[in-house]
Image (cartoon, helix red, strand yellow):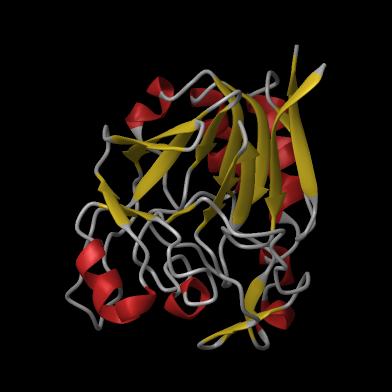
Amino acid sequence: MSETARVTWYGHSTVWIEDSGTRLLTDPLLRDRLAHLRRRRGPAPRLPGAPDAVLVSHLHADHLDFASLRRLPRDTPLVLPAGAARLVRRALGSAAGPCVELAPGDTTTIGGLTVAAVPAAHDGGRGPWSRHRAPAVGYLVHGRARTWFAGDTGLFDEMGKLGPLDLALIPVGGWGPTLGHGHLDPAAAAEAVRRAAAAWAVPIHYGTFWPIGCDRVRPDRFLPPGEDFARHAGEVSPGTRVRVLHPGDSFAVTGS
């Protein structure tokens, strides 16, 4: 068996993907504090180098963090949902790298990889205080492995058209005591990987950032979602093997 791709989860939705000699970074959140949220698990990310491109799934501040993007080399290409480049260029100014906008169905080539935007069932606004909007997306990364980075999403009908997958990077929770519309809890995430026919799945978007005090109010929402997802996946998607990572851990996808 040979390694086809390697991923490192740095917490929340920040994942380093290496495939076919190309390195991608998803939704980088590289600092320990974001507004009222604090990093409660795992160290701040220490990237192994400069990514060949960044994939941004949507405009929410915990996925499109300008302070984190400023920490990357200025020429780093940014792959964004269609309509997001204007906001990014305005916020980053000269620090903004080349911006590529993708709507679902659009593709771009990055090194040895083809990256395709796919739908996501999630609010596309920057926030209630902002007029900036761009439809949320996920990404299919095609190299030696076929990897789905779901971003943040609820269930949607087109999930059945994404597979078969070698790996799904799937959100299974959030950063607070409740999950609203457009999110996956562990049970719904298990249904998502079943629909997408994922051979492997790594749960993300949980157990990293948390408002101060919320871990005392709803501790069941912080660490358990990863293992809960593994249990649900074993029941509804027995063909999917789950690897639960601690922030900073890596996992290699292998093929014959």
Q: Residue furthest front?
A: 75
Describe residue 248's horizontal placement relative to residue 25 as left or right: right
**Above or below, 85 relative to 1:** below
Describe residue 59's horizontal placement relative to residue 144 as left or right: left
- In the rendered image, residue 227, in percent from the top left (x then y), is placed at 77, 47
**Above or below, 241 relative to 52:** above
The quarter in which the C terminus is drawn is: top right
Describe residue 159's horizontal placement relative to residue 32 as left or right: left
The quarter in which the N terminus is drawn is: top right
Visible residue check, residue 243: no
What is the tally of numbered marks visible in this picture? 0
- In the rendered image, residue 212, in percent from the top left (x then y), is placed at 65, 88
Q: Which residue is drawn at 49% across and 24% down?
A: 195
Q: Residue furthest top?
A: 256
**Above or below, 148 relative to 175:** above
| Of 234 and 130, the residue lying toward us | 130
Describe residue 216's horizontal placement relative to residue 92 as left or right: right
Q: Which residue is drawn at 67% across and 62% down?
A: 11
| Of 89 and 135, the residue lying toward us | 89
The image quarter in which residue 123 lies: bottom left
Visible residue check, residue 104: yes
- In the rendered image, residue 183, in percent from the top left (x then y), is placed at 45, 53
The image quarter in which residue 202 lies: top right
- In the rendered image, residue 162, in percent from the top left (x then y), is placed at 43, 25
